[in-house]
Image (cartoon, rainbow, N blue to C red):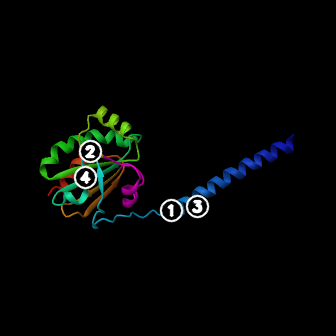
C-alpha cells in the first residue's frame, strides 16, 4: 500500500514538475517584442462594423485614431468602454476617431454587450485574429494612439480611466 502511494505521488510530482518546466520554457521563448513600434506607420486594415460599415484605417488620415482592442469577457474592457464612449462624443467632431476591435467573438455577444452599455462608437470584430496578430496584441485591453499622419504615437495595455482616455485623445487631436 505504501509503495503504491509513493508511486502515485511520484507520478503527480513528475507531472507538476513537467508543467512548470513547460510554462517557463513557453514564456521564455515566446516572441514578446511589440510588433508595431512607436513612431512607425500603423499597419493598415479594413474591417466591417456592427452596422455593416467598412472602416479602413488609412481612410482616417488627417485625423487622430484611438484604436482599442478588447473582448466582452475582459473585466477591464467592460469598465473602460463607457469612458471610451463618453470621450468619443467629446472628440469625434474635433478630429479624433474611435475604432474598437473585438477579438473573435460572435456578433450576438458583441451586440448584446454594446446595447447593454449603450455604446455607439464603431465596433468591429476581428473574426480570424488577423488584425490582432498584425499588431501583436497580448494581453487585452490594448490601445494604440495613431496621429493624423498614420504614425503610432503610443501603445498602452491595461484598463483606462476616463482621465487617461481624455489625455490620450488630446495627444492625437490634430
Of callouts 3 and 2, which one flags the residue occurring earlier in the amino acid sequence? 3
Of callouts 1 and 2, which one flags the residue occurring earlier in the amino acid sequence? 1
* Distance from Cα at disc 4 to Cα at disc 3: 39 Å
* Distance from Cα at disc 1 to Cα at disc 2: 36 Å
Magenta highlight on residue 132: yes
Per the image, the residue denoted by label 1 is 30
Viewer-side label of 1, 2? 2
Secondary structure of the residue carrying numbered label 2:
loop
Per the image, the residue denoted by label 4 is 55
Viewer-side label of 3, 2? 2
Residue 136 drawn at (x, y percent) = 40, 59
* Distance from Cα at disc 1 to Cα at disc 3: 8 Å
Per the image, the residue denoted by label 2 is 52
Quadrant for residue 88, please give it: top left
Closer to the camera, 135 or 19?
135
Secondary structure of the residue carrying numbered label 3:
helix
Q: Residue at x 28, y 59 (%)?
A: 154
**Residue 25, which numbered label?**
3
Residue 151 drawn at (x, y percent) = 24, 64
Q: Is residue 50 left or right of residue 96?
A: right
How busy is the neighbourhood of tag 3: few (under 14 within 10 Å), some, or many (20 plus)?
Answer: few
Magenta highlight on residue 24: no
Amino acid at each position: 500500500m505504501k509503495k503504491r502511494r509513493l508511486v502515485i505521488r511520484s507520478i503527480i510530482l513528475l507531472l507538476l514538475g513537467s508543467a512548470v518546466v513547460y510554462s517557463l520554457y513557453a514564456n521564455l521563448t515566446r516572441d514578446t517584442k511589440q510588433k508595431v513600434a512607436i513612431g512607425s506607420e500603423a499597419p493598415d486594415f479594413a474591417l466591417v462594423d456592427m452596422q455593416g460599415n467598412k472602416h479602413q484605417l488609412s481612410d482616417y488620415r488627417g485625423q487622430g485614431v484611438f484604436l482599442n482592442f478588447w473582448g466582452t469577457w475582459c473585466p477591464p474592457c467592460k469598465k473602460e468602454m463607457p469612458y471610451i464612449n463618453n470621450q468619443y462624443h467629446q472628440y469625434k467632431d474635433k478630429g479624433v476617431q474611435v475604432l474598437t476591435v473585438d477579438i473573435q467573438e460572435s456578433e450576438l455577444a458583441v451586440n448584446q454587450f454594446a446595447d447593454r452599455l449603450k455604446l455607439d462608437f464603431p465596433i468591429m470584430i476581428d473574426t480570424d485574429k488577423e488584425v490582432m496578430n498584425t499588431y501583436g496584441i497580448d494581453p487585452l485591453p490594448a490601445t494604440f494612439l495613431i496621429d493624423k499622419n498614420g504614425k503610432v504615437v503610443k501603445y498602452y495595455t491595461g484598463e483606462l480611466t476616463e482621465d487617461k482616455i481624455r489625455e490620450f485623445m488630446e495627444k492625437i487631436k490634430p
